[in-house]
Amino acid sequence: MHFSSVLSVLVASSSLVVAVPPTDRPTQINPDLRLIKTSEADPGTWVTEDQKIEEYVAKNIGFIDITDITVYQNATTLAKLSTVEDVSLVQAVAVSYPSSLTHQTQANTLINSLNTTGPKSWLKTLSDFYNRYYRSSYGTQAGTWLLGQLRTIAGTNSAITVTTFAHSFSQPSIIVKVPGTSSNLVIVGAHYDSTGGSSTARGPGADDNGSGVVVLMEALRVIAAAKFAPKNTLEFHFYAGEEGGLLGSSAVFANYASAGKTVLAMVAQDMAGYSPSGKVSVYNDYSDSGLVSYVRRIVTQYTGLTYTTDTCGYGCSDHASAYSNGFRKFELFRNQDFGLKVGFADSELAAAYVCDEPIDTSSPYIHSPRDTYDTVSFDTVLRHAKFTVGFLVEASYM
Ligand SMILES: *[C@@H]1O[C@H](CO)[C@@H](O)[C@H](O)[C@H]1NC(C)=O
Ligand SMILES: *[C@@H]1O[C@H](CO)[C@@H](O)[C@H](O)[C@H]1NC(C)=O
Ligand SMILES: *[C@@H]1O[C@H](CO)[C@@H](O)[C@H](O)[C@H]1NC(C)=O
């Protein structure tokens, strides 16, 4: 996760933010540099790959890498990243989220099959890679390992496909699809790259975001083994290059937008394993209020917890990629005080973030060599897996 309290304030006062036209991009002076934006109003700064990690990620300054945006995307997307209002939605479909939960017996049967055996073993392996930096050979090796694991887990249901989504860097994103009778998509996502604060540092990335990855793996395990047959198509996304400025998820959602895919709901989970006081946080900026209410209902039903709210800031996580491409997205974080955090935004654009803690009390170890396996709480991981399965079952019938 990337965040910055200063930037949260900027988002909160978004009515003052002026769009930066794509034509105002600063001129590139060196082809090896990357263009990053730290706020709606920021026209962008050209930096090296190492500067992104050392001067932004390591200092918890949120940013989005927009270098490739003219390749993958277009002016509409860039405009959405540059203003939080008055941007017409190209791709968003009008979705009415159900006002009640109707598949509790089916969801609870699956939830009762969840356990932490797989998550413990998977997270140990993920955090044992020296790092999972998206431009390092370790990051590529982690991708190869994850692909193999996902094929094994999904192998209990031959209807499920596991494919890679290639990027301009070697680490691929990975997409697992559980086909439904409708091609409309319900997506859960987490990124699997990590950083230790520089391109060469040890980066176990256990909480950020190994924990979100193993939550999705465990949810996939029970959904595959039960041969759950959804109405809407379910996808599990494992993104590459998030720490490089949301690179993996940006490319995936831009591709989906240009292919005209319909995404009914997207929930990103990142940092789902560090929760000293046992709450879940649902972040509220860049969120769709209808989807937030729906997710809040699911959290309460399937984890038995209440919830709280927080804001996460510009470029905080992969949900910004769904948002900027006009898709609905929601992220769930773990949170400290045995409650779930949910937030609301007036915007019709949906993009939210669910996490294990509010910003102030989130893991002090992320983006450093100290984000290790032994700082992760598997009760928290299990709670997020319950939420994930509840969400996928309920939303599959939407
Ligand atoms: C973890 O995932 C979140 C959301 O996808 C992202 O914002 C964050 O930067 C990730 N952190 C690490 C260290 O990978
Ligand atoms: C827990 O999950 C593992 C797979 O990771 C499975 O083999 C095992 O049977 C499960 N245990 C229970 C008690 O459900
Ligand atoms: C911009 O992207 C949107 C969404 O993919 C698409 O509908 C639109 O036609 C694109 N505009 C141009 C000028 O390419």
Image: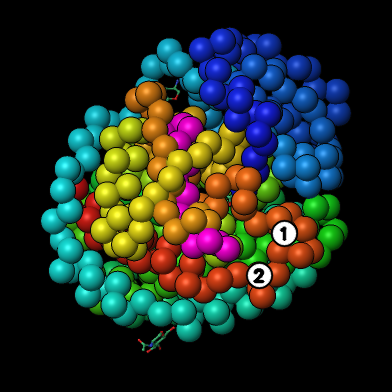
Q: Is residue 379 visible?
A: yes
Dot 1: element: loop
Residue 53 is situated, as x and y percent measured from the top left of the image, at 78, 45
Residue 71 painted magenta: no
Q: Magenta residues, as a range?
A: 275-287
**Residue annotated with mark 2:** 375
- The amino acid on which the numbered mark 2 sits, given as a three-letter code, is Thr
The image position of residue 139, as x and y in percent, is 70, 62
In the picture, residue 51 is in which quadrant? top right
Residue 107, how many percent across, how many down? 23, 67
Amino acid on which the number 1 mark rests in the picture = Tyr
- Is 309 drawn above or below residue 122 in the view shown? above
Q: Secondary structure at mark 2?
A: helix
State left or right for residue 10 relative to residue 238: right
| Residue labelled with disc 1 | 365
Q: Are marks 2 and 1 in contact (CB under 8 Å)?
A: yes
